[in-house]
């Protein structure tokens, strides 16, 4: 039979959307495990012109272990270390941007992207890629995230925040539970094979 896949859900909470007008715009969040954050830092220099055009002039590092490379000078970094999910959620709800270095092709399978979209963060993608259906999960550059390797679209940031948040509402923990229940009910209805 067909192989089914579902986008990730956020493990950092699913709060109501906070309007971008109430958020910090000059700092981009970098969070996740050490390897994901180190990949972001390895790619930031190439994205500096795009980051500056968005008004980003600082990074907020959240996660266990040291990920900021020695001698990293592209932007000032505030390191918060490992935080509880509630503390990470509060940071996401108060900021506009997060940097993600994950192939666009599989972005909907990224837990970091799920956390960002569940908070209406504007994801700034450092690792572009082709989005073949059905793996894209319905995501597109300029609508649900910004691809920093391409010219930035003129779409208002609020529209991207609202679109990524709306996309996530189809993939919440409750939506996943309903989908799993429907699959189990279908399996039970078919009876033994």
Image (cartoon, rainbow, N blue to C red):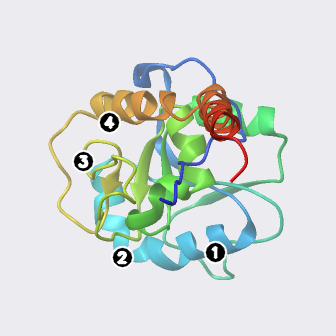
Q: Is 87 positioned to the left or the right of 78 in the image? A: right
Q: Is residue 187 depicted above or below 18 in this figure?
A: below
Residue 20 at x, y percent in the picture: 42, 25
Please tell me whether mark 1 or mark 4 is closer to you in this view: 4
* Mark-to-mark CA distance, 1 and 4: 26 Å
Cα–Cα gap, marks 3 and 1: 25 Å
User: Mark 2 — residue?
Assistant: 46
Marks 1,2: beta carbons within 8 A: no
User: Looking at the figure, which quarter contains the C terminus?
Assistant: bottom right
Residue tagged 3? 142
- Mark 1 vs mark 2: in front: 1
Check contact, mark 1 vs mark 4: CB within 8 A.
no
Q: Sequence order check: which comes first, mark 3 or mark 1?
A: 1
Residue under the point 40% across and 49% down: 137
Instruction: Say if mark 3 contacts mark 4, CB within 8 Å.
Output: yes
User: How far is mark 1 from mark 2, CA to CA?
Assistant: 15 Å
Q: Tell me residue 174's x, y (percent).
A: 65, 26
Residues tagged 2 and 4 counted as in contact (Cβ below 8 A): no
Quick one: label 2, few (<14), some, or many (20+) residues within 10 Å? few
Residue pointed to by mark 1:
38
Asked if residue 95 shows in the view, the reply is no
Residue marked by disc 4: 160
SS for callout 4: helix
Give SS at disc 1: helix
Q: Picture coordinates of residue 184 (x, y %)?
A: 69, 37
Q: Quadrant of residue 109?
A: bottom right
Sequence-first tag of 3 and 4: 3
Q: What residue is drawn where x is 34% and y is 69%?
A: 128
Characterize the local packing of mark 3: few (<14), some (14-19) or many (20 or more) Cα atoms within 10 angstroms: some
| Distance in Å between CA atoms under marks 2 and 4 | 23 Å
68 on left or right of 143: right
């Amino acid at each position: 039979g067909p192989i089914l896949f579902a986008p990730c859900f956020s493990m950092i909470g699913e709060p109501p959307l906070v309007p971008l007008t109430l958020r910090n715009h000059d700092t981009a969040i970098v969070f996740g495990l050490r390897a994901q954050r180190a990949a972001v830092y390895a790619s930031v220099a190439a994205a500096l012109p795009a980051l500056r055009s968005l008004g980003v002039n600082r990074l907020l590092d959240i996660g266990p272990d040291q990920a900021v490379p020695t001698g990293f000078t592209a932007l000032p970094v505030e390191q918060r270390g490992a935080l509880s999910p509630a503390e990470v959620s509060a940071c996401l709800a108060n900021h506009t941007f997060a940097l993600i270095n994950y192939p666009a092709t599989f972005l909907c399978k990224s837990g970091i992207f799920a956390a960002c979209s569940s908070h209406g963060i504007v994801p700034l993608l450092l690792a572009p890629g082709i989005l073949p259906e059905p793996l894209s999960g319905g995501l597109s550059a300029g609508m649900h995230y910004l691809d920093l390797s391409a010219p930035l679209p003129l779409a208002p940031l609020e529209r991207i925040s609202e679109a990524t948040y709306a996309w996530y509402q189809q993939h919440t923990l409750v939506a996943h539970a309903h989908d799993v229940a429907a699959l189990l009910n279908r399996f039970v209805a078919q009876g033994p094979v």
